Image (cartoon, rainbow, N blue to C red):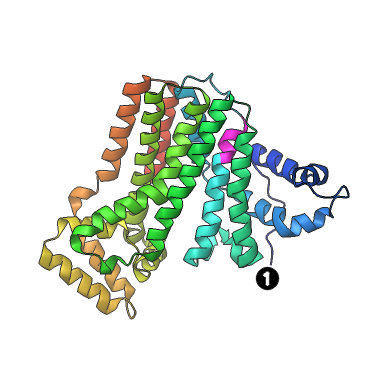
């Protein structure tokens, strides 16, 4: 087992966070350990090495940016969002990716071997779940009014709870065992819980910290939810249409996951056509999963190709009605356009 080099630079917020978390004296005090601190190398091997490895990998950083833009749209002074809040959300996201990769048996993440391949499954799971609790602990130490910190804690815990419900559905539901009428609502519920909730928290957290009115916080939360759902739609669609991403599509098919191509096929095909698609899948999954992908490609209704874009457009319009036009909103629009192009 090889460990990735720890030489890659970390984003400033995460670098400061890890320095503080791994400082021997601070760690001893916060963990209520005996006065003599443990050897720092022990902590590096056990926890901070895996965390640094993963957090230094380049990611989009979109959720953290959304926190900052939500702060501005919520009335906070431009570029003065509490420094820890964006990386708290990124930390929650990173922890979820590490644990998801173990549960899904993923081989790679962010251009490198998944963390459990380089540090082992036990350390990967512990590192991922530690990130959840480290993020929650950090919320309690934010420089915001106590009612804001309490609301952010509550929202973060609710987000994690809902994400775990969504992940449970994604791992356990066999899409081929669902009745045709159940497929779309199952996929939508899984997407909202597993993907949309964390983006909703990212979009609303800055506004909560800025003490924005409740209707603004709600509009931004809905923006994040719709954005998360739209991006998952694009991701699922691209995984069966893009040759560069076909391996992901094949994995989803082999695992019988409830994805948007199945939802669109089920809601558009007649009973006979959908039953034929399911029979093809059951017959070909073990011997030729590529044939199932091709059948899904043929079953994709053309009129659903614009659904993710329309979902985003409605969400952005709702936010503009709640907050008015702003530089931050235009930046969200631009980020949405870039992500649409990247996922598509």
Judged by its main secondary structure, the magenta piece is helix
Residue 279 falls in which quadrant of the image?
Answer: bottom left
Q: Secondary structure at mark 1?
A: loop
Q: Residue at x 50, y 59 (%)?
A: 100
In the rendered view, tell whether residue 189 sits above or below residue 213.
below
Relative height, residue 130 to residue 208 (above, below): below
Mark 1 — residue? 1
Query: In the figure, is residue 194 to the left or right of 101?
Result: left
Image quadrant containing the N terminus:
bottom right
Using the image, determine if residue 285 lies above or below residue 53: below
Residue placed farthest to the right in the image?
A: 36
On whether residue 86 falls in the magenta region, the answer is: yes
Q: Looking at the image, which residue is at 72% across and 51% down?
A: 7
156 left or right, relative to 340: right
- The front one of 58 and 135 is 135
Residue 8 horizontal/vertical position (percent)? 68, 50
Q: Left or right: 201 with respect to 278?
A: right
Q: Which residues are magenta?
A: 83-88
The quarter of the displayed image where residue 228 is located:
top left
Write the residue at 41% across / 54% down. 165
> Residue 304, position in %: x, y?
22, 49
Q: Position of residue 194 (x, y in %)?
A: 41, 51
Q: Residues within 10 Å of mark 1 (few under 14, many from 20)?
A: few
Which residue is at the front of the view, 290 or 194? 194
């Amino acid at each position: 087992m090889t460990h990735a080099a720890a030489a890659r630079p970390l984003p400033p917020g995460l670098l400061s966070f890890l320095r503080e978390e791994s400082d021997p004296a601070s760690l001893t005090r916060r963990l209520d350990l005996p006065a003599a601190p443990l050897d720092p190398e022990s902590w590096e091997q056990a926890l901070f090495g895996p965390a640094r490895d993963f957090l230094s990998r380049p990611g989009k950083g979109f959720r953290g940016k959304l926190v900052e833009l939500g702060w501005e749209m919520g009335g906070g002074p431009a570029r003065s969002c509490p420094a820890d809040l964006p990386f708290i959300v990124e930390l929650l996201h990173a922890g979820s990716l590490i644990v998801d990769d173990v549960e899904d048996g993923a081989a790679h993440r962010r251009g490198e071997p998944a963390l459990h391949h380089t540090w082992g499954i036990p350390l990967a799971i512990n590192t991922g779940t530690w990130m959840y609790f480290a993020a929650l602990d950090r919320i309690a130490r934010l420089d915001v009014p106590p009612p804001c910190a309490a609301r952010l804690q509550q929202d973060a815990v609710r987000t994690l709870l809902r994400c775990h419900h969504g992940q449970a559905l994604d791992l356990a539901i066999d899409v081929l065992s669902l009745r045709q009428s159940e497929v779309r609502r199952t996929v939508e519920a899984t997407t909202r819980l597993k993907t949309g909730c964390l983006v909703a928290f990212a979009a609303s957290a800055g506004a909560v910290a800025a003490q924005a009115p409740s209707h603004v916080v709600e509009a931004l939360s809905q923006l994040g939810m719709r954005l998360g759902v739209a991006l998952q739609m694009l991701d699922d669609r691209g995984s069966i249409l893009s040759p560069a991403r076909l391996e992901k599509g094949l994995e989803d098919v082999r695992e019988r996951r409830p994805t948007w191509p199945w939802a669109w096929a089920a809601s558009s095909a007649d009973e006979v056509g959908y039953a034929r698609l399911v029979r093809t899948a059951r017959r070909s999954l073990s011997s030729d999963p590529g044939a199932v992908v091709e059948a899904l490609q043929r079953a994709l209704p053309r009129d659903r190709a614009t659904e993710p874009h329309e979902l985003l457009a409605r969400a952005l319009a709702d936010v503009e009605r709640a907050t008015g036009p702003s530089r931050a909103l235009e930046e969200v629009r631009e980020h949405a356009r870039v992500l649409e192009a990247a996922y598509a």
